[in-house]
C-alpha cells in the first residue's frame, strides 16, 4: 500500500469516526473571500479574539468546527476550505500532490500558504476581531500553518500546527521575523502517516528563530485527533488569548 492509499484510508476512517458529513452542496453555497470558501460560527464580535481553522485532506468547514471551534469559550471562529475536491470533502492540494517529488509538494504548500495570507490580511472585513488571529490546522492544514508562521508571521497571533509535515528546505526560506510568535506543535507520538520527527525538526528550527515554542507529543496516538489533543489545544489557545497580568494589551496588538 502506497503513501496516498494510506492517507485515503485514514481520512475515510476519521470522517466515519467523527460522524461529520462533508457535503459538496454545502461547500457550493458558502461565501467566498480572497479566493477561499469559508464559514463563520455565529457572528464575529470585534471585542473577541479569533481562531482560523484549516482542515485535513478530505475535511471541510464542518470538520474544522468540530476540531478547532472555541466559540463556546467566547472566541470567534472562521473555518476556511481548501480549493480542491477530494472524495466528499476538500483538499488544500491537487489530486496528484503526494505522487509528486518532495520539492514540488513543498512548492504547492508554499503557494497555497501565500494565497491564504491574503485571506488573513483581509480577515477583518469579514470577521472583526481583537488582535491578530491564532491559526490552527491539522495534517494538510498544519503544513500550511507552518508556512504561514515562517513567511507571514506578522499576520498571526500564534500558530498551532497539528500532525503536520515539516520539510527541511523550509529552514532556508525567506522568513518574516516579526515579533516573538508563539508556536504550539501537537503530534501523535505513534503517527505512521506523518512521522512525529516532523514536529521535532520543526521545534528545533523555530527555537533558532527566537520563537516561543511549545512541543507536545501524544504518546499512543497515531495520525488521528485524540480527545487529549483537543483538550490541550483548547487550554493552550485560551491561555494564549489571556493577557499577561502586567499588560492588558490583547495578543497580536
Image (tube, helix red, strand yellow):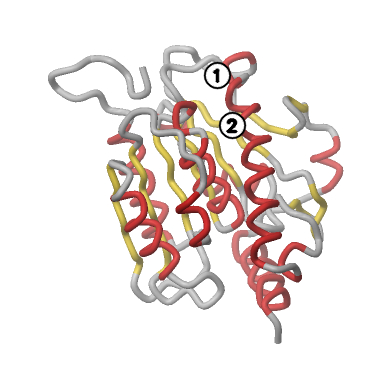
Residue at 56%, 40% in the rendered image: 53
Q: Mark number for residue 167?
A: none
Circle 2 sits on which residue? 78
Report x, y in % for residue 69.
51, 39
- CA separation in Å, label 2 and label 1: 9 Å
| Quadrant of the rendered image containing residue 95 | bottom right
Circle 1 sits on which residue? 44
Residue at 36%, 38% in the rendered image: 237
Report x, y in % for residue 159.
43, 41
Of residues 220 and 119, the one drawn nearer to the viewer in this rendering: 119
Residue at 24%, 23% in the rendered image: 243
Marks 2 & 1, CB-CB < 8 Å contact? yes
Of residues 113 and 59, the one drawn nearer to the viewer in this rendering: 113
User: Which of the two labelled residues, at mark 2 and mark 1, occupies the earlier sequence position?
Assistant: 1
Q: Is residue 199 above or below residue 146?
A: below
Q: How many marks?
A: 2
SS state under label 2: strand
Amino acid at each position: 500500500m502506497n503513501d496516498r492509499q494510506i492517507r485515503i484510508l485514514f481520512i475515510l476512517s476519521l470522517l466515519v469516526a467523527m460522524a461529520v458529513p462533508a457535503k459538496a452542496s454545502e461547500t457550493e453555497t458558502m461565501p467566498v473571500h480572497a479566493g477561499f470558501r469559508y464559514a463563520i460560527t455565529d457572528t464575529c464580535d470585534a471585542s473577541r479574539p479569533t481562531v482560523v481553522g484549516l482542515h485535513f485532506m478530505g475535511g471541510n468547514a464542518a470538520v474544522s468546527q468540530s476540531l478547532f471551534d472555541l466559540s463556546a469559550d467566547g472566541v470567534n471562529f472562521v473555518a476556511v476550505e481548501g480549493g480542491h475536491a477530494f472524495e466528499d470533502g476538500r483538499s488544500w492540494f491537487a489530486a496528484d500532490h503526494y505522487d509528486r517529488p518532495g520539492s514540488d509538494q513543498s512548492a504547492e504548500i508554499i503557494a497555497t500558504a501565500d494565497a491564504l495570507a491574503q485571506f488573513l490580511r483581509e480577515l477583518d472585513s469579514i470577521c472583526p476581531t481583537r488582535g491578530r488571529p491564532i491559526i490552527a490546522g491539522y495534517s494538510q492544514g498544519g503544513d500550511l500553518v507552518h508556512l504561514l508562521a515562517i513567511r507571514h508571521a506578522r499576520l498571526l497571533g500564534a500558530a498551532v500546527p497539528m500532525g503536520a509535515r515539516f520539510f527541511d528546505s523550509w529552514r532556508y526560506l525567506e522568513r518574516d521575523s516579526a515579533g516573538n510568535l508563539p508556536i504550539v506543535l501537537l503530534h501523535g507520538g505513534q503517527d505512521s502517516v506523518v512521522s512525529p520527527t516532523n514536529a521535532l525538526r520543526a521545534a528545533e528550527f523555530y527555537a533558532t528563530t527566537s520563537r516561543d515554542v511549545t512541543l507536545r507529543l501524544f504518546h499512543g496516538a497515531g495520525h488521528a485527533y485524540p480527545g487529549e489533543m483537543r483538550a490541550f489545544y483548547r487550554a493552550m489557545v485560551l491561555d494564549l488569548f489571556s493577557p499577561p497580568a502586567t499588560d492588558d494589551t490583547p495578543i497580536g496588538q
